[in-house]
Image: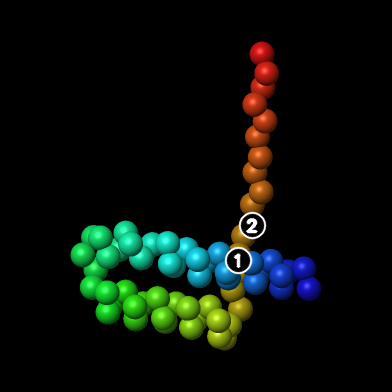
């Protein structure tokens, strides 16, 4: 169950990432109709979950050394 929750969160992050790249791609001359099609296909692929996918999650932290 924990892994399914992590997978759900990762899927939501990927969907948000798709939306965040839209202005950059449109600003570089990509046609809106082409971008809409790519986004819809990627969204559908993520939501249908037809094939098993694996995600590597790495947690890194650092502390600033006080002098």
The circle drawn on residue 57 is 2
Image location (x, y in percent) of residue 11: 58, 70
Q: Position of residue 14 (x, y in %)?
A: 52, 67
Q: Residue at the top extreme?
A: 67
Tag 2's secondary structure?
A: loop
Q: Quadrant of the C terminus?
A: top right
Q: Residue at x 47, y 63 (%)?
A: 17
- Mark 2 and mark 1 in contact? Answer it, CB < 8 Å: yes
Q: Can you say whether 17 is above or below 35 in the image?
A: above
Indicate which disc, 2 or 1, sits on the residue closer to the N terminus.
1
Image spot of residue 46 (x, y percent): 53, 78
Disc 1: which residue: 10
Viewer-nearest residue: 21 or 52: 21
Observer-nearest of 45 and 53? 45
Q: Nearer the viewer, mark 2 or mark 1?
A: 1
The quadrant the N terminus occupies is: bottom right
């Amino acid at each position: 169950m924990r892994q399914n929750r992590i997978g759900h969160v990762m899927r939501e992050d990927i969907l948000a990432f798709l939306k965040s790249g839209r202005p950059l791609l449109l600003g570089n001359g990509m046609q809106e109709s082409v971008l809409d099609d790519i986004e819809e296909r990627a969204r559908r692929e993520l939501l249908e979950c037809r094939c098993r996918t694996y995600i590597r999650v790495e947690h890194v932290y650092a502390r600033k050394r006080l002098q």
